[in-house]
């Protein structure tokens, strides 16, 4: 998040982010800030607020682990063991529906952690459009295509 984007967040946005990072539920945040729960929900969907929450969480995690000797090493060790367990799940030969669902969830999680998030569905509404070209327009298009090398003159 850039400094400019951070400045775009109002003090209310920052308060919401701090409370969420502090472990409060949306209902608690709404009560504490005297706001409607739907307003809190809308604010949390704002990309800038989400980035601020992520930034604050990363800072909190860094400070929490850095001040206790041995914690970063234990976290890395645990992550290594956890990854091994996830891989064991993927390698499991059982193919019952519950196991297949678990394998799919593990695969999605591993891909997401590696930076390959799922493809988001995008809806595009196509507008109806019709164009009419004159014979001169068509000749001009052909000429430009030949000049650009996109089409070889036959």
Image (cartoon, rainbow, N blue to C red):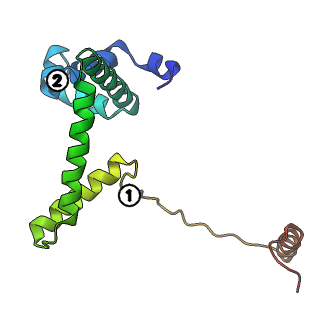
Where does the image place residue 153, in percent across and percent down from the top left?
A: 89, 82
Q: Earlier in the sequence, mark 2 or mark 1?
A: 2
Number of dots carrying numbers: 2
Where does the image place residue 16, in percent across and percent down from the top left?
A: 26, 20
Q: Find numbered disc 2 in the image and state the secondary structure of the residue it sits on.
A: loop
Characterize the local packing of mark 2: few (<14), some (14-19) or many (20 or more) Cα atoms within 10 angstroms: few
Where does the image place residue 48, in percent across and percent down from the top left?
A: 40, 28
Give the residue at mark 1: 121
Placement of the C terminus among the 4 image quadrants: bottom right
Query: Residue 91, which numbered label?
Result: none
User: At x 46% / y 16%, what residue is drawn?
Assistant: 7
Q: Find numbered disc 1 in the image and state the secondary structure of the residue it sits on.
A: loop
User: At x 15% / y 23%, what residue is drawn?
Assistant: 24
Give the residue at mark 2: 23
Quarter where residue 37 is shown: top left
Q: Nearer the viewer, residue 126 or 128?
A: 126
Image vertical order of residue 47 relative to residue 123, above or below: above
> 81 left or right of 146?
left
Quarter where residue 6 is shown: top left
Where does the image place residue 46, in percent across and percent down from the top left?
A: 36, 32
User: At x 38% / y 29%, what residue is drawn?
Assistant: 51
């Amino acid at each position: 998040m850039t400094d400019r984007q951070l400045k775009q967040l109002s003090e209310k946005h920052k308060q919401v982010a701090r409370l969420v990072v502090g472990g409060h539920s949306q209902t608690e945040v709404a009560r504490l800030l005297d706001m409607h729960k739907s307003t809190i929900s809308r604010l949390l969907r704002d990309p800038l607020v989400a980035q601020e929450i992520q930034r604050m969480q990363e800072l909190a995690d860094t400070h929490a682990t850095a001040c206790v000797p041995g914690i970063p090493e234990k976290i890395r060790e645990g992550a290594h063991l956890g990854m091994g367990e996830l891989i064991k799940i993927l390698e499991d030969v059982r193919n019952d529906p519950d196991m297949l669902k678990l394998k799919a969830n593990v695969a999605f999680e591993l891909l997401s952690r590696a930076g390959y998030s799922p493809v988001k569905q995008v809806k595009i509404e196509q507008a109806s459009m019709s164009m009419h070209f004159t014979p001169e327009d068509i000749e001009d298009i052909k000429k430009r295509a030949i000049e650009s090398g996109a089409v070889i003159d036959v």
